[in-house]
Amino acid sequence: MEIFKKKVSAKAIMNLFKKKVTAKEALRTSKREMGVATRNVEREIASLQLEEKKLVAEIKRTAQTGNEAATRILARQLVRLRQQITNLQGTRAQIRGVATHTQAMYATTSISTGMKGANKAMAAMNKQMEPVKQMKIMKEFQKQSTQLDMTIEMMSETIDETLDKDNAEEETEELTNQVLDEIGVGVASQLSSAPKGRIGASNKKAETAATPTPRNVAPAARVGPECSSSSEIDDLEKRLASLRRI
């Protein structure tokens, strides 16, 4: 009894240090063994088929000699031989079926292993993608996106106002030049040399009153051209002032 226990203990210790066989290694070993068995069966089938040919030839020779009893015995041997060949062929088919089934089982095991890894990966991703955390991230993204849209809108309005102001100044300048062109270059030169406002007009009237005039010239005739020039200047100044206010 003690010797048996020692043997069992030694066997258990050896199993502890024995390398664990994986499914792939087991499949490789099984395929190798199945291949060896299939080749052995095929070798036996080929040998029996060769014996069958020899037996058929011997039956023909015996039948030609007229020995009916020997011919019947050889015929029975031929039947048994062919039955053995049929059995070996069935065995070969079964071995191949077992090999195919083993291969399919290994494929199923591989799929199960892959699905196990996929389940672990999906569990890890679900753990990282917490609903509360994802909702917080989405709200923060929406907030930042709204702020960015407001900033872009303010910048666009500022740029549009600046461009509109530049366009208004250009249009004012064009209208001023158009008015000056309508009046004529002579009036524009008078505008540049004439005094501004009503003070200039008063000084002009005073200078006209101080200048001696001939007795035979009527007062309306003496003042007429100067008043006309002053009124044109005033009218031009009003139009320019109205253009600047645009």
Image (cartoon, grey):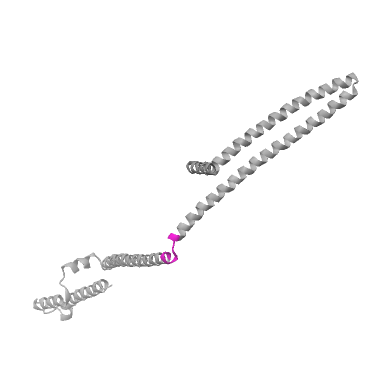
Left-right relation of 43 to 7: right
- Is 178 colored magenta in this rendering? no
Judged by its main secondary structure, the magenta piece is helix
The image quarter containing residue 176 is bottom left
Q: Nearer the viewer, residue 79 or 243?
A: 79
Tell me if I can see residue 20 in this picture. no
The span picked out in magenta is 127-134
Q: Give how far across and how far down residue 136 sits, in percent.
A: 40, 66
In the rendering, at what x and y percent does residue 218 appear? 16, 80
The quadrant in which residue 74 appears is: top right
* Residue at x-position 57% and y-position 48%: 109
In percent of the image, x 63 and y 33: which residue is there?
Answer: 36
Give left or right: position of 109 versus 168: right
Q: 111 or 190, which lies in front?
A: 111
Q: What residue is rendered at 84% in x and 28% in y?
A: 75
Q: In this view, does 217 lie above or below 6?
A: below
In which quadrant is the C terminus drawn? bottom left
